């Protein structure tokens, strides 16, 4: 027993309601039983809890601990400057938390948008009287009155229909409206002709319906339920950044503890040692990494926006670069969503067929062109170029999804004509004659079969076939328009032409190792025809239809998913969600396009959900990570190119940032192992990590894509952001040169001022301040040249060109300005414990910068040589 | 508690077992009529006697009594029209004290109990009526959360299973009776860590046992948090009833590891039954 199979009286009985509706008392009881009729988010995490996460992860806890120790030591040993350090560490925690939160923060607006599709007020019959109530107070059993223009407030069964016509597009994506009846039917829920669904629209007629499900129990609520429950796949970049941060934090802590112990062994005091250990940790933790990653992704998203891909979640920028599979819609994405008549077939002259196409239509001419349903618009445009007819419309039976045809009654030049257009299989059985050479002849079996064959052959070419027919009447009929005994006028074959840029984009995908699967609501033949035209197919298509997909065991579907030339046709959004889940389970990194309300779960489930900006619903746009402003498949491929570049760029600036950790660490080793005055203070380390390094690093994040980036397969899932190659190059190669520069400059200043090892020095002595400043300057100078080496791991800067990334030059300029502010201004000196340097120190440092550049060029040369070697 | 057998038919198919007396608890809430309609269908299919049972306190308002009585009348008529041997009982007192006695008195072997809107099966402190009844009812107990009045007869039943299934025989019997009553398809569902790992042994035994009843049985698996996975599965595959087993987790395990059955029963996407086998059999 299903609600759609019952007679209206049985429906009332089953829902304990009646033609007089519920009583107010009963409605109030049911409201407390079933809850308000509203879409809500299930188990959503609060903003506060999400913000709190940023202050409680592993690295943050370490830093909290370090800050607390600083304040404790300041309390026990005042005047050693640890309070300033504590404040600096807290600043680092807050900066990192803020940047990460901004990066991850995304309001869950999809549910909000779903909520907007429900009405605020609804007309119901309660206590036998019609009254308007808040839609939220609607309960199962309420008798609702629906009229044209109303939004349906709940899932309900039709009890009385006066040509009640609804459009279920928000729920099913099917744009055709359907006329509902109150008779029982056996179809499944969404196909039933006597059910209305929350969130859909009444486009014509009126009727009474009884609510049987409200709020989250409605089909609409289920979308909200599933949208809220979908666990978004964690972006690959997020995984990598978390992993990198953990590794670095562990190295930092292990080093801090190790050297603290070592300091104890060589006889240093506890507080000296503690200061030293904190210094090691601060030196090794790349404080500037998260802000730089976030800003770099933001810049990447801006570049994508210029290519019509609006990024909503920053992590999606890089995630898109890592995808190896795209599940794409057909209409509007691969095609232009611009129906045009490609073929007209008529047994007679084409005038009558064009007359039917022109008049039996609700397309209208406006100042902005012809507007209306895409199919009708195409027929109208085609017909108006061929015939001019003056006619008066007297009656109409609108198109609906079940009848699959439309009829009108027109007076044309004094003749009374019934004009019918619709699907071939619906219209042909109603035809009794056809017109040939001006003579009307009866349709015998052979001719009827010939027409059916013509219909089939046009459909096999991927055309949407519309049959056109007419009938002449003597008088205006009293009742319904007579649609039988028609004269066949012709077939018009329509096609939605592919977007011209799609074949090249697909070729790009192939060379980039990205598989594309078409998942469409259209018929398999139409989908295959388009797939062939755009070069998506490489042989015979493997077409799986939605119903087959729903009943296929997962194991078999997984096997099918391995096949080439795969097309999913007649797919519902639920089927799509299932396919996407299996692909993700199979280890793919998946991007999915979607536009309907029902696509929201799949868009959230995919690694990258891509919504259509032009044709998409607001719910789909809110659930997606990226919105395509032009609905164009080619824009996805451009965005993938940007995404891949972003990963390379992040790796480049991580190399850059990590390289400066070694010259920050070595001074501490010298301090503890060789008892030299500390060559670089913690505040100076922070000046580098959160100051001078930031802008060149950001500039590295803006490198343009290289032509080779789409010539290689997607990054393997196992490939890490922080590889041993990156660590070795940053720490053991580039970092060593920088440490050499810093320590040389430090000893140069110390020796110039008569210092001899192991002579102790007061921390406020001017030459000591100059020496630590010289060490800082050494790192800054070598980082200036390092930014050029880090633009590519193996391509020479001579090939890339020194000025091809203007932002690098801007970053260097800002770095120099910051260095001048720190070294040559009193506030900078006071804050960072610096003292102005003489010219000779800078001159001493320049060769170190050039040495680093030259050495890395040599390294790149050997790498290129070894790569090219047979 | 002895079920009246599930003998084999020629050809290896097992005959549907039958309950002898089914009790359906009815109250003033419309959800209880949906619960009772399940009991009616099951009683009809298994030719069991049906007891429509309501209790109310002495101080209960007239309106509540009226609604309960109306529901009893309606259900009684429906049951009679289906040719079921049915009686209606309305007692004064608390349900937690009266229902267990009534179950024994009627020699009932299955009780359908509709969760009240305020009742939360998965609550940490288990002091609500449902928890007391779980401890005291000496028959199979089907606790129902009604979310949807429009699907009184389920067609697709989702049965989530853990790595081990307690009271397997009784659950199979109940499921078989339910599926047969509604001509429904059963989907057995379990969570797996690894796609290649085989299903748990109890899962396979449960499947084989259901197949013996000649029922259409599907199998599905999912990864991730189990309560969430059940919800997703129910929605994405259009299941209209979830049948869960009662949680066997103690207080500490519930506190530390959660209570998936409780989570699903609290906010199911469709109607849900929590089945607990009669204690003397288990």
Image (cartoon, rainbow, N blue to C red):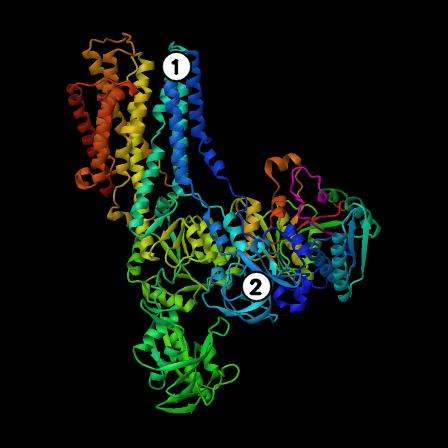
Residue receiving disc 1: A273
- Judging from the image, mark 2 belongs to the subunit labelled A
Q: Residues within 10 Å of mark 2 (few under 14, many from 20)?
A: some
What x and y, as percent, mark residue A864?
A: 22, 40
The structure residue drawn at horizontal position 32% and vertical position 18%, both measured from the top left corner, is A668
Residue at the far top in the pictured view:
A759
Asked if residue A651 lies left or right of residue A265, the reply is left
Please report the bounds of the magenta region as a residue range: B110-130
In the image, A343 versus A824, the foreground residue is A824
Asked if residue B35 lies left or right of residue A43, the reply is right
Asked if residue B85 lies left or right of residue A710, the reply is right
Q: Is residue B102 magenta?
A: no
Instruction: Name above or below for residue B116 compared with residue A347.
Output: above
Identify the mark at residue A74; answer none if there is no mark. none
Asked if residue A564 lies left or right of residue A26, the reply is left
Number of marks present in the image shown: 2
Q: Residues within 10 Å of mark 1 (few under 14, many from 20)?
A: many
Instruction: Name above or below for residue A790 compared with residue A750.
Output: below
What x and y, as percent, mark residue B38?
A: 70, 58
Instruction: Name above or below for residue B61 compared with residue A467.
Output: above
Q: Is residue B124 magenta?
A: yes
What x and y, as percent, mark residue A104?
A: 41, 40
Residue receiving disc 2: A189
In the image, A317 versus A398, the foreground residue is A398
In the image, A312 versus B49, the foreground residue is A312
Query: In 3D space, how far apart are the residues under numbered discs 2 and 1 (Cα atoms)?
Result: 73 Å
Q: Considering only order in the chain, which callout, 1 or 2, is on the residue closer to the N terminus?
A: 2
Q: Main secondary structure of the magenta part?
A: loop
- Judging from the image, mark 1 belongs to the subunit labelled A
Instruction: Name above or below for residue B228 compared with residue A571.
Output: above
**Circle 1: element type:** helix
């Amino acid at each position: 027993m299903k609600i759609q199979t019952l007679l209206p009286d049985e429906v009332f009985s089953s829902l304990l309601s009646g033609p007089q509706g519920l009583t107010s008392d009963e409605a109030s009881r049911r409201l407390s039983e079933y809850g308000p009729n509203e879409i809500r988010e299930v188990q959503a995490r609060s903003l506060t809890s999400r913000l709190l996460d940023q202050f409680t992860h592993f690295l943050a806890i370490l830093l909290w601990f370090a800050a607390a120790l600083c304040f404790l030591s300041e309390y026990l040993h005042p005047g050693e400057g640890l309070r300033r350090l504590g404040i600096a560490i807290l600043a680092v925690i807050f900066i990192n938390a803020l940047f990460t939160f901004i990066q991850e923060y995304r309001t869950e607006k999809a549910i909000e948008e779903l909520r907007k599709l429900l009405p605020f007020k609804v007309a119901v019959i309660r206590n036998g009287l019609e009254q308007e109530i808040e839609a939220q107070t609607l309960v199962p059993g309420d008798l609702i009155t629906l009229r044209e223009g109303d939004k349906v407030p709940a899932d309900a069964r039709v009890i009385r229909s006066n040509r009640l016509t609804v459009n279920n597009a928000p729920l099913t994506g099917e744009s055709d409206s359907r006329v509902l009846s109150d008779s029982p039917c056996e179809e499944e829920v969404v196909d039933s002709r006597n059910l209305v669904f929350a969130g859909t629209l009444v486009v014509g007629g009126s009727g009474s319906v009884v609510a049987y499900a409200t709020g989250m129990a409605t089909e609409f609520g289920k979308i909200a339920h599933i949208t809220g429950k979908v666990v978004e796949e964690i972006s690959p970049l997020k995984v990598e950044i978390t992993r990198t941060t953990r590794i670095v934090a562990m190295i930092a802590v292990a080093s801090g503890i190790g050297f603290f112990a070592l300091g104890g062994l060589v006889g240093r005091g506890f507080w000296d040692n503690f200061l030293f250990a904190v210094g090691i940790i601060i030196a090794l933790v790349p404080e500037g990494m998260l802000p730089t990653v976030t800003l770099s992704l933001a810049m990447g998203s801006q570049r994508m926006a210029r290519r019509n891909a609006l990024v909503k979640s920053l992590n999606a920028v890089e995630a898109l670069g890592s995808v190896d599979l795209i599940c794409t819609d057909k209409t509007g994405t691969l095609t232009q969503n611009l129906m045009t008549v490609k073929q007209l077939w008529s047994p007679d002259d084409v005038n009558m067929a064009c007359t039917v196409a022109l008049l039996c239509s609700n397309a209208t001419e406006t100042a902005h062109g012809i507007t209306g349903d895409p199919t009708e618009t195409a027929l109208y445009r085609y017909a108006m170029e061929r015939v001019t007819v003056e006619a008066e419309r007297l009656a109409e039976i609108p198109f609906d999804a079940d009848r699959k045809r439309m009829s009108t009654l027109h007076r044309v030049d004094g003749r009374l004509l019934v004009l019918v257009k619709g699907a071939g299989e619906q219209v042909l059985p109603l035809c009794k004659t056809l017109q040939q050479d001006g003579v009307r002849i009866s349709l015998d079996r052979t001719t009827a079969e010939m027409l059916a064959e013509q219909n089939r052959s046009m459909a096999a070419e991927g055309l949407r076939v519309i049959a056109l027919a007419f009938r002449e009447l003597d008088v205006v009929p009293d009742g319904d328009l007579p649609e039988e005994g028609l004269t066949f006028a012709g077939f018009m074959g329509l096609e939605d032409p592919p977007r011209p840029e799609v074949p090249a984009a697909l070729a790009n995908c192939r060379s980039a190792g990205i598989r594309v699967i078409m998942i469409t609501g259209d018929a398999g033949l139409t989908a295959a025809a388009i797939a062939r035209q755009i070069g998506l197919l490489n042989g015979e298509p493997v077409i799986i239809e939605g119903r087959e997909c729903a009943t296929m065991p997962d194991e078999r579907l997984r096997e099918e998913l391995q096949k080439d030339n795969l097309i999913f046709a007649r797919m519902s959004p639920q089927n799509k969600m299932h396919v996407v889940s299996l692909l993700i389970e199979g280890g793919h990194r998946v991007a999915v396009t979607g536009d309907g309300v029902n696509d929201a779960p799949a868009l959230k489930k995919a690694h990258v959900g891509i919504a259509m900006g032009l044709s998409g619903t607001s719910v789909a746009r809110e659930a997606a990570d990226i919105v395509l402003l032009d609905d164009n498949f080619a824009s996805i491929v451009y965005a993938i190119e940007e995404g891949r570049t972003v990963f390379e760029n992040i790796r480049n600036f991580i190399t850059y940032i990590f390289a400066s950790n070694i010259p920050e660490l070595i001074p501490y080793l010298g301090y503890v192992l060789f008892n030299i005055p500390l060559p670089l203070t913690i505040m100076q380390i922070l000046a580098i990590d959160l100051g001078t390094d930031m802008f060149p690093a950001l500039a590295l994040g803006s490198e343009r894509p290289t032509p080779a980036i789409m010539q290689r397969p997607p990054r393997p899932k196992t490939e890490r952001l922080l590889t041993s190659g990156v660590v070795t190059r940053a720490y053991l190669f580039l970092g060593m040169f920088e440490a050499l520069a810093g320590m040389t400059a430090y000893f140069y200043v110390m020796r110039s001022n008569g210092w001899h090892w192991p002579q102790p020095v007061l921390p406020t002595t001017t030459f000591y301040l100059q020496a630590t400043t010289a060490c800082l300057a050494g790192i800054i100078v070598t980082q200036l040249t390092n930014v050029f080496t880090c633009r590519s791991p193996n391509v020479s800067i001579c090939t890339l060109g020194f000025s091809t990334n203007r932002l690098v030059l801007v970053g260097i300029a800002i770095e120099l300005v910051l260095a001048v502010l720190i070294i040559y201004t009193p506030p900078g000196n006071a804050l960072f414990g610096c003292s102005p340097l003489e010219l000779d120190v800078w001159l001493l440092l320049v060769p170190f910068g050039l040495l680093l550049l030259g050495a890395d060029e040599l390294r790149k040369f050997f790498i290129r040589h070894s790569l090219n070697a047979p | 508690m002895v079920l009246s057998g599930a003998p084999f038919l020629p050809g290896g198919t097992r005959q549907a077992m039958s309950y002898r007396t089914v009790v359906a608890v009815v109250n003033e809430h419309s959800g209880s009529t949906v619960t009772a309609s399940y009991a009616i269908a099951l009683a009809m299919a298994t030719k069991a006697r049906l007891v429509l049972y309501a209790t109310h306190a002495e101080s209960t308002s007239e309106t509540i009594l009226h609604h309960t009585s109306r529901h009893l009348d309606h259900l009684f008529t429906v049951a009679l029209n289906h040719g079921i041997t049915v009686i209606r009982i309305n007692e004064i007192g608390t349900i937690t004290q009266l229902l267990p006695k009534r179950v024994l008195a009627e020699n009932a072997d299955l009780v359908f109990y509709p969760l009240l809107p305020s009742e939360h099966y998965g609550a940490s402190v288990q002091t609500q009526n449902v928890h007391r009844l779980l401890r005291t009812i000496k028959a199979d107990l089907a606790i129902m959360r009604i979310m949807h009045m429009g699907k009184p007869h389920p067609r697709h039943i989702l049965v989530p299973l853990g790595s081990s299934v307690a009271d397997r025989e009784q659950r199979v019997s109940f499921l078989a009776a339910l599926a047969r009553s509604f001509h429904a398809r059963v989907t057995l569902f379990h969570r797996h860590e690894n796609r290649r790992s085989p299903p748990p042994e109890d899962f396979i035994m449960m499947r084989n046992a259901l197949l013996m009843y000649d029922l259409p049985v599907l199998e599905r698996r999912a990864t991730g948090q189990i309560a969430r996975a059940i919800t997703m599965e129910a929605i994405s595959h259009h299941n209209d009833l979830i049948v869960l087993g009662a949680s066997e987790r103690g207080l500490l395990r519930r506190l530390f590891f959660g209570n998936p059955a409780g989570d699903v029963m609290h906010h199911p996407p469709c109607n849900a039954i929590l089945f607990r086998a009669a204690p003397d059999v288990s």
